[in-house]
Image (cartoon, rainbow, N blue to C red):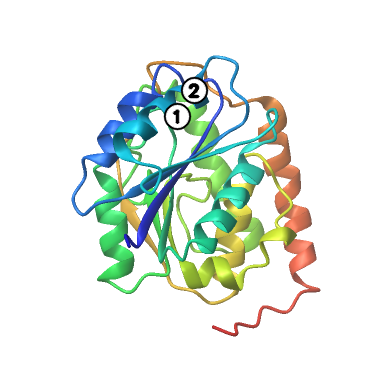
Amino acid sequence: MNSRIVIIPTYNEIENIEAIIRKVMSLEPAFDLLIVDDGSPDGTGKKVKELQTEFGTNRLHLQERKGKLGLGTAYIHGFKYALGLNYEYIFEMDADFSHNPDDLVRLYNACANDGADMAIGSRYINGVNVVNWPMSRVLMSYFAGYYVRFITGIPVMDVTAGFKCYTAKVLKTINLDSIKFVGYAFQVEMKFTTWKYGFKIVEVPIIFTDRTKGQSKMSANIFREAILGVIQMKINSFFKKYKRSL
């Protein structure tokens, strides 16, 4: 069985879904794919089912949920599903090609060959590598990283990155049911918790290209959760023991 699976949460990604699936499925080494679709009314889930007849349900997996339940809960659902099937390397990626699927191989190599427990596709480890973003959003994202590092002490440049590879032992160690955030703060919480458990985190430089098709899911509420939630997360960490059994 393949040891690699890529989790892509979707909501109304009909313009991107077939192309991203075909690209991921073409990679060497081979990656399996799990689409977690939150009841997209545009037919995203239906398109995935059509493609399952071509690629097989053993490689192209689909989990459909009732309604838009949030990015974080989609990934937690996907992590549990992947662990249940004994995948060793579990990836997070967006559906909209803002993350280059070719970089999955580099993230995998960082974990499988270079000893990382978490590999992050980083926009900021070598300057600012973002294409098609307005300057206001670049600055917001970049300085959010400074803010999170200042509050938490985490030595990661791209703390809000959503392009990652985890080894199974990281996801088995973290109590996934204790992860509280659902928006972009979810990405911060997962990195912070991984770091607190003493796992090795490596940043792999990537070029991030903003979506050209479909609608962005970014909102002011998501950003507010990240700003306020980071302080609460840091305070909560003082009362928690981070002991690894693996």
Q: Is residue 238 left or right of residue 75?
A: right
CA separation, marks 2 and 1? 5 Å
The numbered disc on residue 177 is none
Residue at which label 1 appears: 49
Amino acid found under the numbered disc labelled 1: Lys
The quarter holding residue 231 reads: bottom right
User: Is 197 situated above or below 90?
Assistant: below
Q: Quadrant of the C terminus?
A: bottom right
Q: x, y (%) of residue 148?
A: 61, 52
Residue lying farthest left? 28
User: Is 196 situated above or below 229?
Assistant: below
Q: x, y (%) of residue 245?
A: 60, 85
Observer able to see residue 209: no
Amino acid found under the numbered disc labelled 2: Lys
Q: Residues within 10 Å of mark 2 (few under 14, many from 20)?
A: some
Q: Is residue 183 left or right of residue 94?
A: right
Mark 1, secondary structure of its residue: helix
Q: Quadrant of the N terminus?
A: bottom left
What residue do we see at 36% from left, 37% from top? 99
Observer able to see residue 41: yes
Residue at which label 2 appears: 46
What residue do we see at 65% from left, 39% from top? 183
Q: x, y (%) of residue 221?
A: 72, 30
Viewer-proximal residue among 60 and 70: 60
Q: Is residue 28 left or right of residue 161?
A: left
What residue do we see at 55% from left, 59% from top? 191
User: Is 146 situated above or below 46?
Assistant: below
* Disc 2 to disc 1: CB gap under 8 Å: yes
